[in-house]
Structure formats: C-alpha cells, structure tokens
Amino acid sequence: MLEIYISYCFRNPLPSIAVFITLIPLILIILRKAYIDPSFKLLLFYLIIKLLIDIAMLCSAANHENNILYFNLAIPVNYAFLGGMFYFKFDSSSLKKGLLASIVGFFAFTAWDVFNSNSEITDLHNHRAVLFAKTVEGVLIITLILLFFYEIIKSLQIPNLLTFPFFWVCSGLLLYYSSFIFIAPVLHYTATWNHSVDMGITETIPTIFEIVCALFFSVGIYHFSAADYAKQ
C-alpha cells in the first residue's frame, strides 16, 4: 500500500510537495509559540485541517478514487479559519460583525452550491467540484486582505511590514487566491472524475502559488516573537 502512495508522489511531485510543505509553517507555529496570538492559533488549526484533507485527497487519488468531495468540504472550513484570523486583526466592530456574518452565510452558500452542482448528491463516485463557492471564497479572502492592508496603512503603526508576521501570511494568501480565483469556476467542468480535462500550465499555477503561500507563512511565523507579543 505504501508503495502506491510513494509511486504517486514521484509521478506527481508538485502536488505532493504542496501537500507536505504545510508541515513547515505548522511546525514553526509550534516552535515559535506563535499560537499565543489568536490569529496564528486559527492559522495552526487551518494548517492541521488542510494537511489532513490534502493527505486524504492524495491517498484517494493514488487509489484512483474520487477526491473532489474533500475539495468541496474544505472550502467553507478554510474560509472559517482564514477569515477568523482577520477577526482578531480588525479594529472596526462593524467589520468584525460583517466577517462573522460572512462566515455563517458562506457555509450556507457552499452547502447550496454542493447540492446545486451535484444532482445526485449520494453518488460520491461522480461527485463534482462546486460551481461558485471556490470563486466566492477567493473574492472574500482577497477582500479581507485588502481591508486589513487598508487598516494598517491608515493606522501607520507598523514601522516595517517586512518584519510584521501577519503581513507575510496575508501576502501568501493574496498570491494563492489571486492565482486560483479565475481557474476555480472552470473546475466544475474540467475536474470531473471520469473525464478530467488537462488544463496544462494553467492547472499547475495554483499549485505553485500554494507552495509559495506556505513558504510565505513560514517567513511570517519565523518573524514572530513570543516575547514581543507578550509585551503588547
């Protein structure tokens, strides 16, 4: 059984790297004790869930099983954890309330999209990617990042963004979701289990930026100082 997974990883090196590179920021959060910051604690939970889902998807793909269900289930969970990080970073109470409402609303929207995209919801073998939810997730995350950047620029309280841990987290997410947002709507039609369409380099770009995103996370976490955070 292990040989099947190893063989799959060698045949698909880039997606496999994107799965296991998550371990780097995950371990760094623990070593740097970045989890004392509520936002980074949510990031830790996100990375754990992401790693588990990605491994499940990798194992399913290696065994020639439909793994798109995991992709769909991860969408609202990802937004809940990633969006939740910004709750602790926003100063505006109205933004915080809007963020919480968007998380609840997005769960409902994704559930509708899953059922809408799969007329036979019990047919897991032919389960298809959602039509709208992944794109909406990208738009929401990018909006949160831009709002956060606006707040920190407006406040002028951060002397050096390059040593500000959450800046690197936001930058990584911005790169990843910007690369994925235009591809996501097509996945409903191309990422079918029986007749997958080869999108060439277009399909590879989000995977590359997923790896870059994990590296950006790692840089940001590396700059985190538990001692400095305790003084705040």
Image (cartoon, helix red, strand yellow):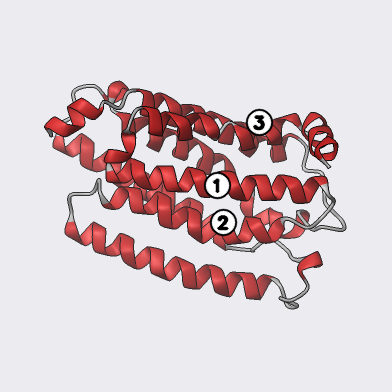
In the rendered structure, the answer to whether residue 105 lies left or right of residue 136 reads left
Q: Earlier in the sequence, mark 1 or mark 3?
A: 3
Q: Which residue is mark 2?
A: 74
Residue visible at 70% across and 49% down in the picture: 57
| Front residue (pair 210, 156) | 210
Q: Tell me the crowding category of disc 3: few under 14, some 14 to 19, or many 20 or more residues within 10 angstroms, Cα based.
A: some
In the rendered structure, the answer to whether residue 57 lies left or right of residue 96 reads right
Task: Please state the total of marks drawn on the protein image.
Answer: 3
Given the image, on which type of amino acid does mark 2 rest?
Answer: Ala
Give the secondary structure at mark 3.
Answer: helix
Q: Position of residue 123 (x, y in %)?
A: 78, 73
The image quarter containing residue 13 is top right
Q: Position of residue 35 (x, y in %)?
A: 33, 39
Query: Is the residue 89 above or below the residue 111 in the image?
Result: above
Mark-to-mark CA distance, 1 and 2: 8 Å
Residue visible at 32% across and 30% down in the picture: 165
Mark-to-mark CA distance, 1 and 3: 14 Å
| Front residue (pair 14, 23) | 23
Query: Is the residue 26 above or below the residue 73 in the image?
Result: above
Instruction: Tell me, for residue 50, which label it has, or none.
Output: 1
Mark-to-mark CA distance, 2 and 3: 19 Å
Give the secondary structure at mark 1.
Answer: helix
In the rendered structure, the answer to whether residue 115 lies left or right of residue 193 reads left
Q: Position of residue 99 (x, y in %)?
A: 32, 60
Residue found at the far left of this picture: 231
Q: Which residue is mark 3?
A: 17
Residue visible at 50% across and 71% down in the picture: 109
